[in-house]
Image (cartoon, coloured by chain):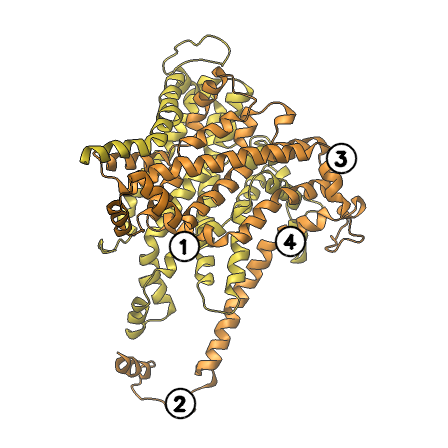
Chain colours: A orange, B yellow
């Protein structure tokens, strides 16, 4: 192989004559080419990186400005003076954002718990237990990922109205306890990578089917469960349409809903406050992102590739 | 023993199975039935057969505008987003110092979405003092009115969607890293350059992942809602009135539940059709290795 390689390398210009190293022009040297390559890659990724990061910096910059400086043109990047109290004032002056935070947390945590329970159990069934009709049922799981939520939304709304659940958190939390196709798929993919010998050994030691799930599969799947928790957190934290449809009273509002109303009321006068509250709203997402980056990537690899 | 395992299987999947009947299957049938009625959520419902569909296709001028807007947004954002994500993924696959930092920078925007981000972009798009027009002025371009302009409001939403290419970039990057090195070596031995490597190894080996990304992106982009609702409400005029925005208005603002149900089913059929078309066309461009995983 390496013989063939070196022979081909000398044929690069089709001359068939091997150049002695010294007579190579400077740009064909390995070290020089490596440096040029690194410079080229940086030249391509740095501008993109800057463009993608600027909106965040702009947001933070606006959030720290005093009102006079917001509409200054050309814009000043570094606020002077820096008004840290924008965060406190934006959060407390206009609406009870602490209450909205509490509402968002309750709904999000309820969804995470519900999803972990209602997706791990079916995923275990699909990954490990033999039964007639299993393949068809799993195809249905994948098929329902294709159904737009808008098709089921109106009848669901009618159902929850009939139950008297509108203007409560129940419509936003209960469905999470009944499985979510994407997470079932993700967890099944992960469970299937756990060696079956472990199940068999546990079964010989007298473990039941549920004991195997509880003692073997779940403890070994912490990364996958964390992935589901992270995705569920992000999805529910950002969810706007559900709360918009189901919640009417202001004291039931989630952060997303409150933020939209805040914008509607304050229009474009209070950009510094709006940006400050937006930064605070995004903070949990950004923190979780940095703590759990590997889980995101793992989840995407588990489902995006082997699907 | 075998029978016990079957019972255990059905116990295990029962949460999902109940959910399928209550929250997906049942509503799916119910919304189909509703779409044949003139129900408003308040009055008694009367069966009007295909009336809603007839009205949508032949009388509702907005419906065709909405379709046109949705296809415009969907295809433009998916095409540009996929090309962008692919280029970003190839760059992120290069072995240069500090590449992890750039991966994080590129990926992060795609995780943040929702109202906070929509409000941020309203501010970025501000025609007089927004950041985007300021940056354009630095290179001597006078930026347009963006969200306030009939012509530029939709391009603004498409531009905003490109900020989130990081998610697809990560999927494609994982696919790139799964391509075995010896294939590239083979190209080099045959005297190929980087372009040949891309054309004869990267693209065919990545095509299943690319296919997945495009299918999912189309499904998502046809259902864009939050950004439109927060940023433009479908305006100015009907410039950004996308399918789901109009559906929402019909259902929850005009209380035309039957009409909205018909719209939802048409959307479902459109999405199924587009997905089916992509699967059909995939045999011409998606390259699957023999099942030797």
Q: In this rendering, do the residues under marks 3 and 2 share a single chain? A: yes
User: Which chain letter matches label 2?
Assistant: A
Q: Chain of mark 3?
A: A
Sequence-first tag of 3 and 2: 2
Q: Nearer the viewer, mark 3 or mark 2?
A: 3
Marks 3 and 1 sit apart, C-alpha to C-alpha, by 45 Å
Q: Secondary structure at mark 4?
A: helix
Q: Nearer the viewer, mark 3 or mark 1?
A: 3
Query: In front: B234, or A251?
Result: A251
Residue at (37, 91) in percent of width and height:
A20
Q: Mark 4, residues whose alpha carbon is within 10 Å: few (<14), some, or many (≥20)?
A: few
Query: How far apart in space, not on screen, are marks 4 and 1 (Cα)?
Result: 30 Å
Q: Residues within 10 Å of mark 1 (few under 14, many from 20)?
A: many
**With A20 as the anchor, is B123 left or right in this view?**
right
Residue A212 spot, x, y in % from top left: 32, 43
Q: Please tell me if label 4 and label 1 are on a single chain.
A: yes
Q: Which residue is mark 1?
A: B172
Q: Nearer the viewer, mark 3 or mark 4?
A: 3
Say whether disc 4 or disc 1 marks the residue closer to the N-terminus. 4
Pointer 3 and pointer 4 on the same chain: no
Residue behind mark 2: A21
Relative horizontal placement of residue A81, taking residue A261 as reference (left or right): right
Q: Which residue is mark 4?
A: B136
* Residue A256 vs residue B268, the one in the foreground: A256
Extreme front residue here? A205
**In this rendering, which labeled residue sits more in front, label 4 or label 2?**
2
Check chain identity for marks 2 and 1: say if they share one: no
In the displayed structure image, the side of residue B30 where residue A31 appears, left or right: right
Chain under label 1?
A: B
Q: Secondary structure at mark 2?
A: helix
Marks 3/4: CA–CA distance: 36 Å
């Amino acid at each position: 192989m390496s013989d063939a390689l070196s022979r081909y390398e000398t044929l690069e210009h089709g001359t068939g004559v091997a150049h002695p190293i010294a007579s190579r022009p400077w740009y064909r040297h390995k070290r020089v080419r490596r440096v040029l390559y690194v410079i080229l890659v940086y030249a391509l990724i740095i501008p993109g990186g800057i463009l993608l990061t600027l909106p965040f910096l702009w947001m933070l910059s606006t959030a720290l400005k005093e009102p006079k400086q917001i509409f200054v043109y050309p814009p000043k990047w570094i606020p002077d003076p820096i008004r840290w109290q924008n965060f406190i004032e934006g959060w407390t002056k206009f609406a009870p954002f602490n209450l909205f935070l509490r509402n968002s947390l309750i709904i999000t945590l309820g969804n995470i718990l519900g999803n972990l329970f209602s997706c791990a159990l079916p995923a275990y069934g699909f990954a490990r237990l033999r039964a007639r009709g299993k393949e068809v049922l799993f195809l249905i799981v994948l098929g329902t990922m294709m159904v737009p939520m808008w098709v089921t939304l109106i009848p669901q709304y009618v159902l929850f109205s009939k139950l008297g659940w509108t203007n409560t958190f129940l419509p936003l939390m209960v469905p999470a306890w009944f499985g979510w196709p994407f997470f079932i798929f993700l967890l099944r993919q992960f469970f299937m990578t756990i060696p079956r010998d472990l199940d068999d050994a546990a079964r010989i030691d007298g473990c039941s089917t549920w004991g195997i799930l509880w003692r073997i599969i779940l403890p070994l799947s912490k990364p996958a469960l964390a992935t589901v928790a992270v995705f569920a957190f992000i999805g529910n934290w950002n969810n706007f349409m559900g709360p918009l449809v189901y919640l009417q009273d202001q004291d039931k509002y989630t952060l997303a809903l409150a933020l939209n109303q805040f914008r509607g009321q304050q229009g474009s006068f209070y950009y510094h406050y709006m940006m400050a509250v937006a930064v605070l709203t995004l903070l949990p997402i950004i923190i979780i992102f940095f703590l759990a980056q590997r889980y995101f990537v793992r989840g995407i690899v588990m489902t995006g590739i082997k699907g | 023993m075998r029978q016990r395992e079957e019972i255990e299987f059905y116990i295990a999947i029962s949460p999902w199975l109940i959910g399928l009947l209550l929250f997906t299957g049942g509503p799916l049938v119910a919304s189909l039935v509703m779409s044949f009625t003139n129900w408003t959520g308040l009055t008694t419902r009367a069966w009007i057969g295909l009336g809603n569909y007839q009205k949508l296709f032949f009388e509702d001028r907005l419906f065709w505008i909405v379709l046109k807007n949705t296809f415009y947004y969907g295809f433009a954002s998916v095409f540009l987003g996929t090309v962008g994500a692919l280029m970003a993924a190839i760059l992120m696959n290069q072995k240069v110092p500090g590449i992890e930092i750039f991966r994080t920078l590129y990926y992060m925007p795609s995780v943040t979405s929702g109202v906070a981000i929509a409000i941020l972009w309203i501010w970025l798009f501000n025609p007089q003092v927004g950041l985007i027009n300021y940056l354009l002025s630095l290179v001597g371009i006078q930026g347009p009115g963006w969200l306030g302009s009939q012509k530029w409001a939709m391009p603004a939403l498409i531009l905003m969607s490109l900020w989130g290419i990081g998610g697809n970039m990560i999927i494609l990057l994982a696919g790139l890293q799964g391509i075995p090195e010896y294939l590239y070596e083979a190209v080099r031995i045959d005297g190929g350059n980087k372009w040949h490597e891309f054309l004869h190894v990267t693209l065919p080996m990545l095509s299943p992942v690319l296919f997945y990304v495009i299918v999912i992106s189309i499904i998502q982009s046809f259902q864009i809602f939050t950004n439109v609702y927060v940023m433009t409400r479908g305006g100015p005029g009907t410039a950004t009135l996308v399918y789901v925005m109009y559906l929402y208005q019909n259902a929850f603002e005009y209380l035309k539940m039957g009409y909205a149900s018909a719209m939802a089913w048409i959307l479902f059929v459109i999405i199924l059709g587009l997905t089916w078309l992509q699967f059909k066309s995939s045999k011409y461009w998606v390259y699957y290795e023999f099942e030797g995983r």
